[in-house]
Amino acid sequence: RALWMRRSGDGLDLLGKHFDTSSGIWTETLSGIGSNSDSFYEYLAKHHVLFPDDGDDVGGDGNGGGAGDFWTMLVEAYNGVHRNSRTGEWYPDTDMNGGTQRGARHVFESLMAF
């Protein structure tokens, strides 16, 4: 949840690759679906499947949300990647604060088979 709460704003919903847990600051703002990122999406899906009745509060507003919290995070993160990291049929690494508008790193890894 700490990562999700620190995703990029302005509707981008992108996450960086490295995060300093002491300061709460992204140390690597490169965003993507490959190495250092793929597990985040995987764990959101697995948590939703394994704990469907988890009523944790995603937004931190005390309203809960029930079983959809982790699924909602996954859908919003997926949509953020689809909207802001996609270049043609590929999903290259981009800056989490600007998406493809700030350019993309066109180096593809095997873990990027999204």
Image: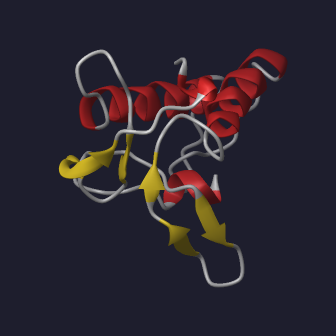
- Left or right placement of residue 89 versus residue 19 in this view: left
Q: Is residue 104 above or below residue 84?
A: below
Residue 2 in percent (x, y) is at 63, 60
Relative image position of residue 89 (x, y in whole percent): 30, 15
Q: Is residue 79 left or right of residue 46?
A: left
Q: Check the image and report above or below for 64 versus 108.
A: below
Q: Is residue 48 above or below residue 107?
A: above
Q: Residue at x 71, y 82 (%)?
A: 22
Query: Which residue is at the front of the view, 56 or 99?
Result: 99
User: In this view of the protein, which residue sits in the foreground, 108 or 28?
Assistant: 108
Q: Is residue 61 visible?
A: no
In the image as oriented, which residue stretches furthest toward the front? 107
Q: Residue furthest left?
A: 101
For image coordinates 48% across by 51% down, the residue present is 15
| Residue occupying image coordinates x 64% and y 52% | 1
| Image position, residue 61 (x, y; %) | 50, 55
Residue occupying the far right of the picture: 50
Q: Nearer the viewer, residue 26 or 53?
A: 26
Q: Position of residue 20 (x, y in %)?
A: 66, 75
**Residue located at (75% from left, 19% from top):** 52
- The number of discs equals 0
Residue 92 shown left or right of residue 21 in the figure: left
